[in-house]
Amino acid sequence: MVATDDGFVMINDGADDESRRRVFFLDRACAVVRTVSYPSTPRDTEDLAVGADGTLWVADIGDNNRSRETVAVWKLAPGADAPVLYRMAYPDGPHDAEAMLVTGDGRPLIVTKYSAVLYAPTAALRTGRTVPLARVGQVRLPASTTSNPFSALGRTAVTGAATAPDGRRVVLRTYADAFEFEVPDGDVVAALTGSTPSVTPLPDEPQGESITYSGDGRSLLTVSETAGQPPGTRAPVLRYPRPAAVASTPPPSTPPPTTAGSTTTPGPSAVATSDRTGVGRTPIVLAGACGLGAVVVGLLVARRRRRGSPARR
């Protein structure tokens, strides 16, 4: 998921049915207004990013069985009818990954799921050519005690990433927390490997694998998968105010995030904000409307059982 001036763009995790083989454009009310199909079938799409020029980057990097010879990104230029495929290969064998950032100079930066190792291409991406990846660092995330359905394993599995609209912050998420890093000089790798992040607990999201910034950069937006949840369960998009946005407010206790139909405020603070995504002036963002949008996109379809366990993803 990424937030845009007009609403949101979403992809599904994986590509094992036709509904997962499209990029979905949603308006501010979370209604699907456009879809773009891939020209060929992706393997396992896991994350979505937007570059400084508005190009969408789809990370086709999932590898549950660690058996892929190559991974890929799909680039969808603004206004284009179809994304373009670029293949890459790890230097040290297959890895499972679910998070990707795009650096200021237009390079994809892959973050592996359980070891948080960073990989970047060694040359410019080219169609029809597999570009080697190089290991460029490793992230050391702080210890966490935040509750999540997968316990200790869920506190270390990196399942999503995003870059702030101004490019001066990046965030990695696990099933339990969001870890935000300052990027004052544009060097994302140095920020991830050499600085201490601020932490936003994301408690009890059933299978939280998506994160993005709001249009004004003041909030983190998340959505969880619904594997193992009752059929028809809605997946609300939740807003968590960034730590810097509430620094002058005494820290309250952290309640669980809001689900559809609930009145509990999500995240560490109930700061009302407004942003250019048109989400609205409430910290319970999109619990109803985007829940419906997520149904349309297919985020609420129960995952295959082999995808329900973090140890096998």
Image (cartoon, rainbow, N blue to C red):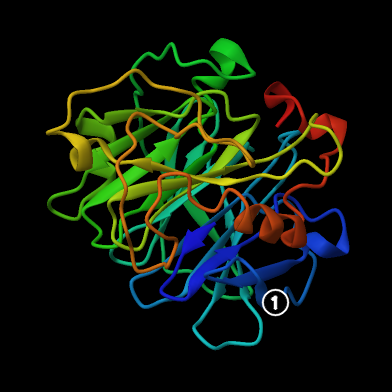
Give neighbour class at mark 1: few <14, some 14-19, many 20+ (Cα, 10 Å): some
Residue 294: which quarter of the image? bottom right
Q: Nearer the viewer, residue 303 or 46?
A: 303
Q: Nearer the viewer, residue 225 or 154?
A: 225
Place of residue 38 in the rendered image (x, y in percent of width and height, measured from the top left): 73, 73
Task: Count numbered badges in the picture.
Answer: 1
- Quadrant the N terminus occupies: bottom right
Place of residue 25 in the rendered image (x, y in percent of width and height, measured from the top left): 61, 73
On screen, residue 57 versus residue 276, left or right, reads: right
Residue 37: which quarter of the image? bottom right
Vertical side of 66 occupied by 4: above or below: below
Vertical side of 287 occupied by 139: above or below: above
* SS of the residue under disc 1: strand
Kind of residue at disc 1: Thr
Residue drawn at point x = 19 percent, y = 55 percent: 186
Residue drawn at point x = 79 percent, y = 31 percent: 229
Residue designated by label 1: 35
Place of residue 5 in the rendered image (x, y in percent of width and height, measured from the top left): 41, 74
Vertical side of 46 occupied by 147: above or below: above
Q: Is residue 313 visible?
A: yes
Residue 194: which quarter of the image? top left
Residue drawn at point x = 77 percent, y = 65 percent: 21
Q: Nearer the viewer, residue 230 or 309?
A: 230
Residue drawn at point x = 34 percent, y = 36 percent: 270
- Quadrant the C terminus occupies: top right
Place of residue 285 in the rendered image (x, y in percent of width and height, measured from the top left): 48, 50
Q: Nearer the viewer, residue 208 or 232?
A: 232
Q: Is residue 95 visible?
A: no
